[in-house]
Image (tube, helix red, strand yellow):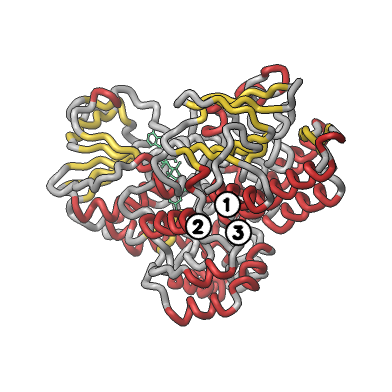
Amino acid sequence: MVQTPSNPDVVVVGAGFAGLYMLHRLRDAGFTAMAFERATGVGGTWYWNRYPGARCDVESMQYSYGFDEAMQQEWHWSERFAGQPEILRYANWVADRLDLRRDIRFETSVTSAEWDEAACLWTVRTDRGDKLRVRYLVMATGCLSAARLPEIEGIADFRGNTYHTGQWPHEPVDFTGQRVAVIGTGSSGIQAIPVIAEQAAQLTVFQRTPNFSIPTHNQPMDTEYENLWKSDYSGRRERARGMRTGILHDLNDKGALEVEEAERRAEYERRWERGGTAFMVAFNDLVTNAAANDTAAEFVRAKISATVRDPQLAELLAPKDHPIGTKRICADSGYYETFNRPNVALVDLRATPIQRIVPEGVLLSDETLRPVDSIIYATGFDAMTGALTAINPRGVGGLPLTEVWAEGPKTYLGLCTVGFPNMFIITGPGSPSVLTNMIVSIEQHVDWIVDCMAWMRRHGAVRLEAEATAQERWMEHNNEVARRTLYPRAGSWYMGANVQGKPRVFMPYIGGVAAYRQACDNAAKDSYSGFLLQMDRAAAQ
Ligand code: N01
């Protein structure tokens, strides 16, 4: 067995899907690497988000690695949309099969990283007292990994049990007979609520903003469908890489207003019945044209009012403050139907905000108390930047990332940021990341980064840093493509709007996976144009 050296070439932070593939590619390319992972196991987001009902909204046949034909042929998914336990099993299977654990230190958090300009090395420290000096630092920290509790007074005063969907306990939680509160109605809340409602004696949902949700109509994997995929898996993966979202959907190339009302309705109906987020590609202009978007939003609102028996409740659940899809669209299993249950109640926080949490439960602004035994915070994450700024690496001149990104994250290609040489971010802000099938984006980033490191090794380059002008141009391009869409109209976590004081900038790149890949490949082909390189001929191998 090869021992990982104490000062490997690369430190990888995180052992989710990004960190695992990174380790594999680095090893194949002849680099030594060590990954640090704060959890006890691999899987990243699928390790932490164990809440009841957690499920991927990208179809299983697509939400998996595509780099190894034998692996993708061998693995069998049991459902059309895989649940969290199965995805976590898959991550563990991959880690074992590729023998990755020997290069991962679990239950170890990276606490600091400092760039040493003279030596062209990163000094990385962990909470277990490790100190490593490495050439490359790879942040595989995930886009939705810094769970956040809301700014509500009195959270610590609560006498019952408190949970966060993004930090769910490993042991089963039984809500039988309990009065349960769920605060938050994003993807996590919307998935958890129907499952918890079946167990709890009384479930109270505290909703600040209603969200659009499409049913998944999840079902056991259809063997014919699986075989169809597997008959040309690599071809399908390749086609997916050419799609805007990295997902092979049946895109409609017509605009919503180009067709008659009856055809439009039929198209929405067909997709609603089929289930899943492909609803958003029913027409080609749903995220760019407000009038087109409104037809889709109206269709979903009508579905909500047809499903929820109490018209007042249906009205409260119908989103009206943002175009559909501009907050991440949710995918559910019986969400709206859950509000027909006698043991489920909705509190509209727009009308009556939470005053504070008290030992007995939730106290509203009108002094009514909602007594509960458990509170579940489904309140999301400090998305895209939170895990990076928590480590807060210090780059050239000791400048901390939090200072450099004080007005919002700035990157070149979402991969690197000025002032932080030899530091790569996997699916960082400024890359398509969360707008796509994450695994497709992860594979593309990892391949690009490892190819870049191998190129540097071949050419004797010891330092690579994004150029300020290239970064500026990339950020301008990012903003420009975002402005052409409806996305900036929503107060979403894409915009940093869910964290008080976080700058409002649209963080992911919305130009699409294919255009983005082209931009990355062009830079690489052009000897890493847009990057400053420092050569040390003696180091060339
Ligand atoms: O978090 P969110 P999430 N008082 O930020 C509310 C991915 N994911 O964990 O909208 C009361 O979306 C907040 O209200 P508002 C997916 O990308 C994927 O649900 O800010 N409420 C909102 O309703 C997803 O988008 C999958 O007004 C407060 C909720 O909490 C992302 O993770 C499954 C509040 C937070 O929603 C994050 O989803 C799960 C307060 N003080 C997650 N603060 C799938 O693959 C916040 N809220 C299906």
Q: Position of residue 144 (x, y in %)?
A: 49, 42
Q: Are marks 2 and 3 in contact (CB under 8 Å)?
A: no
At 67% across and 19% down in the image, what residue appears? 399
Residue 21's disc is 1
Whole-angstrom CA distance, mark 1 to mark 2, is 38 Å
- Of mark 2 and mark 3, the one earlier in the sequence is 3
- Location of the C terminus by quadrant is top right
Residue furthest to the top in view is 397
Q: Position of residue 163 (x, y in %)?
A: 30, 38
Please rate how many residues cluster around mark 3, counting C-alpha atoms within 10 Å: few if below 14, some from 14 to 19, many from 20.
Answer: many
Label 3 sits on residue: 286
Between tags 1 and 2, which lies in front?
Answer: 1
Q: Helix or strand or loop: what does disc 2 sit on?
A: helix
Res 11 quadrant in image: top right
At 34% across and 36% down in the image, what residue appears? 349
Whole-angstrom CA distance, mark 2 to mark 3, is 10 Å
Front-lying residue, 234 or 369: 234
- Of mark 1 and mark 3, the one earlier in the sequence is 1
